[in-house]
Amino acid sequence: MRPMTRAEREAFLAEPYVGILSVTAEPERAPLTAPIWYEYRPGGLVKVITPAGLRKVQLIEAAGRFALCVQVAVIDDYRYVSVEGPVTEIRPASKQEGYDMAVRYMGPARATDYVNATAKSAPSNVAILMRPQRWNTVDFRLPLDQ
């Protein structure tokens, strides 16, 4: 077991894993925690897109920050990255951003149908951008020479 280097953690976070978003909730409640698609490029911001008006958006607005945890949990390959930081921007998400996120997770063949279908149930999405500030990482893979 070892922590990841900066290059390793950023490359890992840039992969299209499903993240688990957490944000502080109201007093007497645990943090809100939910799976979410995200986008990250090394050295950049974490971006999530979600329907406007949801409780998680309201909590993120109130807290001004959120955390995201991403993991691989298979035999001989258990790694995770947890990142937390301040929100830098909340704004309407463009249809292109929604399409790009869908391509990231579903591929281009299914992305158009997905975007069109979800536009009916979530006609207005917001993009929430977070600047990574605190990282926790672990790589449990054994070195190749063991």
Image (tube, rainbow, N blue to C red):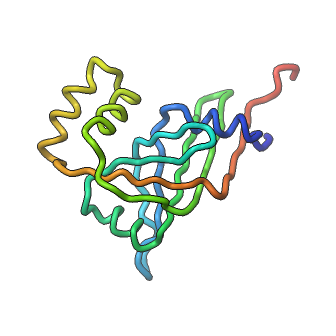
Name the residue furthest top: 109
Residue at x-position 47% and y-position 49%: 20
Nearest the camera: 58 or 35? 58
Residue at x-position 53% and y-position 57%: 67
Q: Is residue 33 above or below residue 123?
A: below
Position of 14 with respect to 59 (left or right) is right
Give percent across and percent down for residue 92.
29, 53
Q: Is residue 17 above or below residue 109?
A: below
Give percent across and percent down for residue 78.
65, 35
Position of 9 with respect to 85 (left or right) is right
Nearest the camera: 43 or 24? 43
Q: In this figure, what is the number of numbered marks?
A: 0
Name the residue furthest bottom: 27
Residue at x-position 63% and y-position 45%: 81
Q: Quadrant of residue 101?
A: top left
Residue at x-position 74% and y-position 31%: 141
The quadrant of the picture occupied by the N terminus is top right
Q: Quadrant of residue 27?
A: bottom left
Position of 38 with respect to 54 (left or right) is right
Give percent across and percent down for residue 18.
45, 39
Give percent across and percent down for residue 45.
53, 48
The quadrant of the picture occupied by the C terminus is top right
Name the residue furthest left: 120
Name the residue furthest right: 145
